[in-house]
Every structure is written in C-alpha cells, then in structure tokens.
Image (cartoon, rainbow, N blue to C red):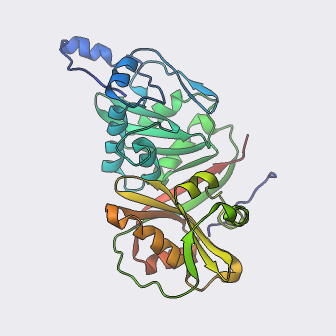
C-alpha cells in the first residue's frame, strides 16, 4: 500500500480527399474542430467536422477556439491519439480504453472529454478528463502539453491525475493548478505481465462479485483508500454487471478484492488489489491477480497494473507473478473543491 496521504483538511475528424492547393490546406489548420460525444460513424463525423459545436460532460460545456489543439471524439481522430499513445508510452491503458470505447474498435460513446494537440495527423500531447474528475495525461513534445492545458476551461477541475512521472511534473507546474491544493503525490511503478506460467497455491476460493457483496465492497473501498492514499473504483453496479470484480472468499467472508478496470485491445488493467488485514499472508491476492490476468489470455491481452513504490508487499507479489516494471508513474490527488 502506498503512503497514506497527510491531509491538512477534512476530509473526429473524417475528411474526404482534399483537392485544394497547398496554400488552402495550410489555412485549414486554424479551423476549430469540435465533435459530439455520441459520434459513432463516418457520416456523423463528416457532418460534425465544421467550425462550431460544443461538447458537454458532467454539466460542463466545452467550446474550444481555433488552432492545432482540438477536441477529439471521432473514431478517426481517436485513432490518431491512440496510435500516439501506443507508440510513445507503454503505461496508458486507462487512456487508451477511453479512446477505444467498450470492447475496443473505437465504437460507442466516450465517457470523457479528450483534448489533443494535433497538426495534420501528428499528435504530440493529449489529456482525457472523465466524469469522475479523473485525468490521464501524456505528451512527447515540449510545450505541446502546455498548449492543451491552456485551453481546458477552468471549470473542468481534476481530483486525480495519472501518468508518467516526468509528464505529471510538467503538467502540475502549469498555472491552472496553482489554485488547487494538492492532497497527495503518490509515486508509483507501472508493471506488465509477460508470462502466465506460474504457480498459485491453495487458500480460499475465488469468484466474481455479486450484488449482495456491495456492503462488503463498501468496507473494502474505505479500507483501501485509508491505506493506499487514493480511492478504489466504486461504480459497483457497472463493475459487477461486466464481471470485473474478483473476490477471494474464506469461510463465507470476502477476504480479498481485485478489479479488472480499464481494457484495450491488447491490455487489461488490474486495479484496487486489497486483502483485509485478518486474511493477509495467505497468498489470496496472488490467486485474484492470476485469475484476472488469465481472463485476457484468450484475447492475447497482457495484464498491467500500477502500484505505489512504497507498497512492498504488493511489489513482492507482482514480482512473484513475473510482472516487469516498465516506467515510473505518478498519481496526484487534489482536495475536492
């Protein structure tokens, strides 16, 4: 578990072939391109690729000015950002799952506002802001991330930001964060599982969560945040319906929890691994992580996870299961406004 936080307070662009001259094409770079959250097909993309429009998320209306920083909600532009993330970062499973949508393939609505710095078909920075006020950030060119952050409306406020350590540091130095009081900075390690051939051992039995497990899951959420320093996913209804919560049960009591949260075409993200204190040191979490990881084997998906660098027990467990560290990752949380 990571360091507990020291709280000071209670707490799409689709284009037809472009036959215009080079000079006319250059002029197009300044056009504002804003797309709706419900855009799904080529026809919708072409209809929306104009110079106006707004996007609303969680009662926040977004209307960006012109320039290379654009709103991304068409499958084409989502694909541009997804390729950028895939080619430049191995730690953006959460971000890529937002872009690809349920089941992958860039179909369906995106439950997030995504803004990217794109000129032509080249993306150099992007952020995703979800309904739960959780942000994902990535960039590859100095200054590009600043351009994106300059245009995010001030009423879209993050409560949690995740990404590679150096990029998070660049982001929170931006002036838009100066008036937000930081709650906690959790230094993490991002790991990926490359081998499924490992022993698990005995200890209880695991099963998927059911609706009658919600009271125990509520207890888990409280204890998890207390020890780890940031909240576990708590949208129980959706997670249970999608078979994403794995439990280990000992003598009728839920002893350990793990969640398969984000999913892309090639990765699944395991989050919220936690064992209640009376049931620790029995290998229960190993069984859960192994069970969740195996859910991706048939789809050729690798399991990835993010763990606090001070969480020695969990790092030891992941080492045992042959997870390999790939990058330093930071999670910043802010006091709720």
- Which quarter of the rendered picture does the N terminus lie within? bottom right
- Residue 199 vs 36, above or below: the answer is below
Residue drawn at x 50%, y 46% as measured from the top left: 136
* Horizontal and vertical percent position of residue 36: 47, 26
- Residue 306 vs 276, above or below: the answer is above
Residue drawn at x 41%, y 35% as measured from the top left: 144
* Horizontal and vertical percent position of residue 2: 62, 67
* Horizontal and vertical percent position of residue 103: 40, 49
Q: State the image quarter where residue 337 is shown.
A: top right
- Residue 115 vs 233, above or below: the answer is above
Residue 26 shows up from this direction: yes
230 sits to left or right of 294: right
Residue drawn at x 48%, y 44% as measured from the top left: 137
Residue drawn at x 44%, y 45% as measured from the top left: 138
* Horizontal and vertical percent position of residue 29: 33, 19
Q: Which residue lies furthest to the bottom in this view?
A: 202
């Amino acid at each position: 578990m990571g360091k507990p936080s020291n709280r000071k307070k209670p707490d799409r662009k689709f284009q037809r072939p472009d036959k215009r001259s080079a000079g006319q094409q250059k002029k197009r770079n300044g056009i504002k391109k804003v797309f709706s959250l419900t855009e799904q097909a080529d026809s919708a993309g072409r209809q929306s690729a104009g110079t106006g429009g707004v996007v609303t998320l969680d009662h926040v209306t977004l209307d960006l000015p012109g320039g290379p920083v654009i709103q991304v909600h068409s499958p084409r532009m989502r694909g541009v950002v997804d390729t950028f993330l895939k080619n430049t970062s191995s730690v953006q499973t959460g971000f890529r799952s937002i872009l690809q949508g349920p089941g992958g393939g860039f179909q369906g609505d995106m439950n997030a506002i995504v803004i990217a710095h794109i000129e032509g078909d080249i993306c150099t920075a992007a952020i995703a802001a979800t309904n739960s006020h959780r942000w994902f950030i990535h960039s590859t060119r100095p200054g590009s991330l600043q351009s994106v952050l300059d245009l995010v409306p001030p009423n879209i406020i993050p409560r949690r930001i995740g990404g590679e350590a150096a990029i998070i540091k660049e982001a929170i130095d931006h002036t838009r964060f100066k008036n937000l009081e930081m709650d906690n900075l959790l230094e993490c390690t991002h790991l990926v599982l490359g081998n499924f051939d490992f022993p698990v051992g005995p200890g209880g039995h695991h099963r998927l969560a059911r609706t009658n497990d919600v009271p125990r899951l509520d207890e888990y959420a409280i204890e998890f945040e207390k020890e780890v320093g940031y909240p576990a996913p708590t949208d129980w209804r959706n997670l249970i319906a999608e078979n994403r919560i794995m439990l280990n049960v000992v003598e009728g009591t839920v002893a350990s929890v793990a969640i398969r949260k984000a999913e892309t075409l090639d990765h699944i993200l395991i989050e919220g691994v936690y064992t209640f204190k009376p049931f620790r040191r029995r290998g229960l979490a190993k069984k859960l992580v192994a069970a969740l990881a195996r859910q991706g084997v048939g789809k050729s998906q690798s399991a990835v996870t993010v763990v606090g660098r001070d969480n020695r027990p969990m790092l030891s467990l992941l080492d045992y299961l042959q997870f390999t560290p790939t990058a330093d990752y930071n999670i910043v949380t802010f006091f709720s406004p």
